[in-house]
Amino acid sequence: MKIATVLGARPQFIKAAPVSRVLRKQYTEVLIHTGQHYDPNMSAIFFEELNIPTPDYYLGVGSGSHGKQTGEMLMKIEEIVMQEKPDYVLVYGDTNSTLAGALVAAKLHIPVIHVEAGLRSFNKQMPEEINRIMTDHVSELLFCPTETAVENLRKENITRNVWNVGDVMYDAILYNKELAQRQSTILADLSLAEQSYYLITIHRAENTDDPDKLKAILAAFRDIDGTKVWPIHPRTWHKLEEYGLDASAIPGLRLIDPVGYLDMLRLESGAKKIITDSGGVQKEAYFLRVPCVTVREQTEWVETLEGGANILTGTDREKIVAAVHKEVAPVYADVFGDGHAAEKIVAAIGQR
């Protein structure tokens, strides 16, 4: 059996690592990297650290508007899929790479496997929400990370070939967190002590494409006491420059280049709190038992909100500052599976 896997962004590389490791023991995998994330610190380093096989195809699509980026992916992925003739096309998550891979396969009558199916923020202003919904509705095999995701699909009348396998990012955390502890030197490199800093990641279009929201977020960072470390996404850099905003002038804020997966895990595990708008980072904070503040109005990872582990603030400056300074004692639950999602996915594919 041949499976074509379409990847393009940092979270997908992390999810693919445990699945590819198991998948390739039984099947042939053709890896297609769209190039949606192309900065070396957002792409190549993940393949090296996570031992993901070198992509068979690199499309070099890069950044651009949603229409341009997705359209270019559609054309290039279609050529490869027609040439390779896979039995399945496998996609992860909710990026434009996800949608492009799923649409190509569906149009060519090749069954789609969607890993991380069923997530909903119920905010269609988010491009990721549109990608999730459309991908789920053209998929043949849908692997959900939680029971909430299964229920979301049921409400949309998607009940056939749906499995709750747990979260493959949890697989990756369990496999790599001790490795990160041993190998990463990022805290020493930055002269950071454990629990002495806040970790920031901001990159979602809903925040970065709105200058007023980005200004409010920076104003909140200015009001947060202490050291704040921000590995800044290239797209966010461009937006700050476009709007004439100078984040480097904020007291205590240390802007650094994007980091690899192991360094990111180490920064996350060592932080006293994480401030983010990333779905993946919300989960990583939960898995690592680090309190999280999410700069969004909704989250697709509603499980992280229970027990006070994650607080939604939107972009309101006062809410962000209050949530960051608030003392919390989160309660965590085992709602993301047992760390063997990859094995369950490959077993289910084998039953088809």
Image (cartoon, rainbow, N blue to C red):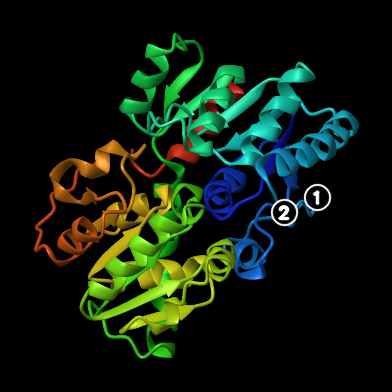
Identify residue type, mark 1: Leu
Name the residue at 74% across, 57% down.
54
| x and y percentages locating residue 336 in the rendered image | 32, 39
Quadrant in which the N terminus appears? top right
* Kind of element beneath mark 2: loop
The answer to whether residue 202 is visible is yes
Query: Which of the two residues, 35 or 166, is positioned nearer the viewer here?
Result: 35
**Residue 146 falls in which quadrant of the image?**
top left
Name the residue at 68% across, 46% down.
65
Name the residue at 70% across, 33% down.
101
In the rendered view, would you say 17 is above or below 258? above
* Kind of element beneath mark 1: loop
The tag earlier along the polypeptide, 1 or 2, is 2
Q: Horizontally, is 228 left or right of 98 in the view?
A: left
Identify residue type, mark 2: Gly
| x and y percentages locating residue 2 in the rendered image | 76, 32
Q: Horizontally, is 128 left or right of 39 in the view?
A: left
Name the residue at 90% across, 33% down.
83
Mark carried by residue 35: 2
Mark carried by residue 281: none
Within 10 Å of the Cα at label 2, are there few (<14), some (14-19), or many (20+) other Cα atoms? many
Residue at the disc numbered 1:
59
Q: Are marks 1 and 2 in contact (CB under 8 Å)?
A: yes
| x and y percentages locating residue 231 in the rendered image | 47, 72
